[in-house]
Amino acid sequence: MNRFRRLRAHESIRRLVRETHLVKEQLIQPFFVREGTKKQEAIESMPGIYRYSTDQLLRAVESYQKAGGSAGLFFGVPDKKDNQGSGAYAATGIVQKAVKAIKKNFPKFLVITDICLCAYTDHGHCGIIADGAVDNDKTLPILGKVAVSHAAVGADIVAPSDMMDFRVSHIRQDLDKNNFQNIAILSYAVKYASAFYGPFREAAHSTPESGDRKSYQMDYANAREALKEARQDVAEGADMVMVKPALAYLDIIALLRRDLNVPLAAYSVSGEYAMIKVAAQKKWIDEKQIVLESLTAIKRAGADIIISYHAQDALRWMNDKR
Ligand code: PBG
């Protein structure tokens, strides 16, 4: 029998035996970028998160770096959409312009780009529509082009989030063919069809015109299927895999951690952020404590890397003593 309280008696002893630590270099802040100049548009359901024009994005990245941030995940919000999502791979597309500017100004900042068509298609689905359905194999060449166009402007890592089968191997091949062997793939391998993405769709203007994403994103009732998805993505060449959302899926993170030996990321999504933010604004919860506790829980479950809209605040709070 033991007296467990001995190791909890005061903060310095608690620190000595603490098992899980947040690491600044493993936090990733998502950024939304749109056309134009001098724009910083608030996203109503995500207080504190903005859609920036590239000039303002540079300032946001600079301030994030000053806070200790070293990596960002970039989403484009284009003005024009079409049924092929061609804006997603245009050499002068919104993400391409933004990444070029970031790499010019902050060459060491780690740039990760989201690969998906939903913000670029007029129908809002993540793939090409053929015969009334999202067509997996017709979408693959387009995703490959998107990845190559991001690599061409300096992205370090591409992160496919569309959930088409075989997109990782397809993207890997297209990157290699174009001499981008060193660009890594962070696959959204385990992405559930989730109501937690609601605020993001407002942010990225990517709500599907009709239907939902259940024919390509995973059923949230399934855990074994997560293993199949993740193993296959690793076999296809993913350097890292992701679970998304995070907080309601800690069991899935833990499951993958035990099974895989690649770096594991978790994406704490827009709905998770919105719930904390709005309760904090009402002063019903202590935002700092809730955020640090939640991020630590995601880490404890087994994630190495955490993508979170709280990243910049968390970096600041991590400097404080608990
Ligand atoms: C694009 C994509 C989505 C998110 C990241 N990439 C939305 C979706 O699948 O509908 C969600 C991120 C968030 O909610 O923060 N497919």
Image (cartoon, grey):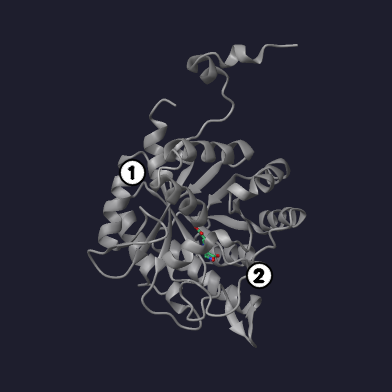
Single out the residue that lies furthest toward the left.
38
Residue 297 x/y as whole percent:
58, 38
* In front of the other: 105 or 195: 195
Q: Residue at x 59, y 26 (%)?
A: 19
Quadrant assignment for the N terminus: top right
Comparing marks 2 and 1, which lies closer to the viewer? 2
In the displayed structure image, the side of residue 250 where residue 11 appears, left or right: left
Whether residue 167 is visible to the viewer of this picture, yes or no, is yes
Question: Against 81, is 313 above or below?
Answer: above
Mark 1, residue position: 65
Single out the residue that lies furthest toward the bottom.
131
In the displayed structure image, the side of residue 144 where residue 113 appears, left or right: left
Residue 229 x/y as whole percent:
70, 58
Type of amino acid at the residue the image marks with label 2: Lys
Tell me how far mark 2 sits from mark 1, CA to CA.
37 Å
* In front of the other: 101 or 193: 193
In the displayed structure image, the side of residue 165 where residue 202 appears, left or right: left
Q: In the rendered structure, find residue 214 and report the number of the disc placed on it.
A: 2
Type of amino acid at the residue the image marks with label 1: Gln
Q: Residue at x 38, y 79 (%)?
A: 80
Query: Is the CB of the residue bearing disc 2 within 8 angstroms of ligand 1?
Result: no
Question: Against 255, is 214 above or below?
Answer: below
Could you say whether the residue bearing mark 2 is in a helix, strand or loop? loop
Whether residue 309 is visible to the viewer of this picture, yes or no, is no
* In front of the other: 58 or 156: 58
Residue 172 x/y as whole percent:
58, 62
Residue 140 occupies which quadrant of the picture?
bottom right
